[in-house]
Image (cartoon, grey):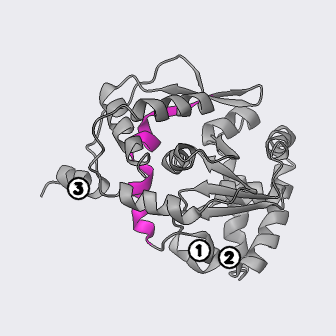
Amino acid sequence: MTEYMKSVRAFGRKRLADTVYSKEEYELEELLGQLLSEAGKVGSVSDNPFLEEIYKYSEWIRYDEYTAYVFLMRDALLPYIYFRSKNRDNLYPWLISRKFLREITEIDDMDDDIRIPLYGALEKGHVSYDRYFPFCREEILEALDEYPELKKILSDMLGTIKQNRIVVIESGYMGTIPMMLAALDSRVNFRLFTTAPFLYDTYQDKIFCRRYEDIRKFETMYSQDLFMQYSSWRDGKFYVNITTDDIVREQSLTEIKMFLKG
């Protein structure tokens, strides 16, 4: 079997040339509503078997009417569609990407400053979450003091949420952004699809599965990886550009269609 075919079989899609995006901007939440409507009219559903795992993950998150749910795009687009298709309230799609962080802070790898405390906690032996989080929180807040504009924007975003509990949803690995939000607001908890193996015992009930090797499959769905990209942040809203590639759009809609069932 060629390396190309191994890639197709492993990740569930063919490799594509660099995806091209339009220059037109779309407000994120409105766009997601349009996608949900368009997907409802699509006749076929993607045959990618891994979508069932993402669906099960979405079910596992569970819903509570007194909790707000923050979905970190692009990776949590499909779980967001799952919740929104069921007419759930208190849903917040946020695109806190590297591009967003770079735009606000004017620093290319600003997220490294947040990630370093996560490693530092483990190096000091803080494996259990009740020791890991307090160490990380102090270090993350100290790092954020270097970026007052970003700290204010994120704090204000969290401040718009009135519920007493907030659950942040992401694909996983280190949980850098969920941990940053948790450091800023004591209401925040999070649910990851998986995490790095060295964090299995730390995040425990915060992860859906201990199959870190599946994270690549999760993050490379057409809809979550290629359909849109961050464009800008203004007036308290995220704006994105969408692909001009018809294949990516068609495949994205068939994936989203899967999350409209039941």
The kind of secondary structure element at disc 2 is helix
The answer to whether residue 168 is visible is yes
In the current view of this chain or complex, which residue is farthest to the front?
A: 262
The kind of secondary structure element at disc 1 is helix
- Name which of mark 2 and mark 1 comes first in the sequence: 2
Q: Quadrant of residue 169?
A: bottom right
Left or right of 73 on screen, residue 102? right
The disc label shown at residue 9, or none: 3
Left or right of 92 on screen, residue 259? left
How far apart are the two marked residues, 3 and 2, measured between alpha carbons? 35 Å
- Name which of mark 3 and mark 1 comes first in the sequence: 3
Query: Which residue corresponds to the image point at 65% horizontal and 40% vertical from the top-left?
Result: 108
* Three-letter code for the amino acid on which mark 2 is drawn: Leu
Left or right of 79 on screen, residue 97? right
Kindly report which numbered mark, 3 or 2, lies closer to the viewer in this rendering. Answer: 3
How far across and how far down the image is residue 122, in percent?
A: 68, 76
Segment tinted magenta in the rendering: 211-231
Which residue is the site of mark 2? 122
CB of mark 2 within 8 Å of CB of mark 1?
yes
258 in relation to 140, above or below: above
Which residue is the site of mark 1? 199
Quadrant of the snapshot with the N terminus:
bottom left
216 drawn magenta = yes
* Three-letter code for the amino acid on which mark 3 is drawn: Arg
How far across and how far down the image is residue 80, in percent?
A: 55, 47
